[in-house]
Amino acid sequence: MKIITMGEIMLRLSTPGNSRITQSNEFDVVYGGGEANVAVSLANYGHDAYFVTKLPQHEVGQAAVNALRQVGVHTDYITRGGERVGIYFLETGASMRASKVIYDRSHSAIAEASEDDFDFDAIMKDADWFHWSGITPAISDTAAKLVEKACIAAKKNNVTVSVDLNFRKKLWSKEKAQSIMKPLMAYVDVCIGNEEDAELCLGFKPTANVEKGETGAEGYYEIFKEMKETFNFKIVTSTLRESYSANHNGWKALLYDGEKFYQSKRYDIEPIIDRVGGGDSFSGGMIHGLLTKESKQEALEFAVAASALKHTIPGDFNLVSEAEVEALCQGDTTGRVQR
């Protein structure tokens, strides 16, 4: 199936191991970013996954393109131009010390891209799904306009649209987020986002403290119902993270389709190798599950298993196969060597 994602792919500079930025003399280099990570997951599951962005012509831009090509993502719709690739620095936490992200992404190529850089009708032709996240409209006003144009083209071509709300307080305020995100919800069929995202992006009052890891499924029921009724979503879904420490999380998910609430099995993840991209891997697994599984419960189980596995893999990309996810869904959590 042809699946489109659009956003920013960045150069990630992470400290080796659990060292702090202030003590590091070198950084590990990988590439990643919300919608790019989703495209990688979908390519791993056998879909024709296309990533839409703008990258400079120089070697760093080419390295980002190559990173996607190496894992099977189609780069046909990547426009070349602009001055820079966005950067983010990652300091991986441990125990009670949280991980930290520092952005250096202002004036990146995609943040300054224009509508003339993309032919969205051609991009959406024969597509089955279009996915974006709240990070993309947050990076610039012009990027927000690109999201709107892409959504319009998707609906014109009868393409299912999903969003991961993904509020980033380092990129915009809740007031700015709501002014942009609420109108864009008119194009969305599948909404992904926890209670914090729902409050900050869409204005729904939370009943649980997400920051403290108070994520009982019951706290989501009323908000999911309100979200669906307000924006006419077909599906609302979210991961539920229980944060015991930087290295130890509980992990499950919830889905609501207007008739029934579905709750996944819970995974105890310890030690966490890299939690960056965990939500993106859930989105990728959910899209695959909704497109290929017979029931919403199966789709949910696939998505949460895929995202649990991502926590064991360094880097932004979830480099797992469909077969590996299915094995975890079936209860294979032993970690035994495969011979």
Image (spheres, rainbow, N blue to C red):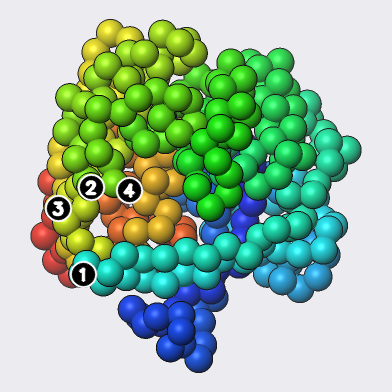
Q: Residues within 10 Å of mark 3 (few under 14, many from 20)?
A: few
Circle 2 residue: 212
Circle 3 residue: 268
Q: CA distance from mark 1 to mark 2?
A: 15 Å
Q: Residues within 10 Å of mark 1 (few under 14, many from 20)?
A: few
Label ID, residue 307: 4
Label ID, residue 95: 1
Left/right placement of residue 48 relative to residue 97 reads: right
Instruction: Give, as a three-letter code, the residue at label 2.
Output: Lys
Mark in front: 4 vs 2 = 2
SS of the residue at dot 4?
helix
Residue 319, given in percent of the width and then of the height, sits at 41, 58
Residue 117, given in percent of the width and then of the height, sits at 85, 42
Residue at image point 27% right, 69% down: 97
Instruction: Give, as a three-letter code, the residue at label 1.
Output: Ser
SS of the residue at dot 3?
strand
Instruction: Give, as a three-letter code, the residue at label 3.
Output: Asp
Mark in front: 2 vs 3 = 2
Residue at image point 72% right, 23% down: 153
Left/right placement of residue 295 relative to residue 287 reads: left
Query: Looking at the image, is mark 3 or mark 1 earlier in the sequence?
Result: 1
- Within the image, what quadrant is residue 150 found in? top right
Whether residue 131 is visible, yes or no, is: no
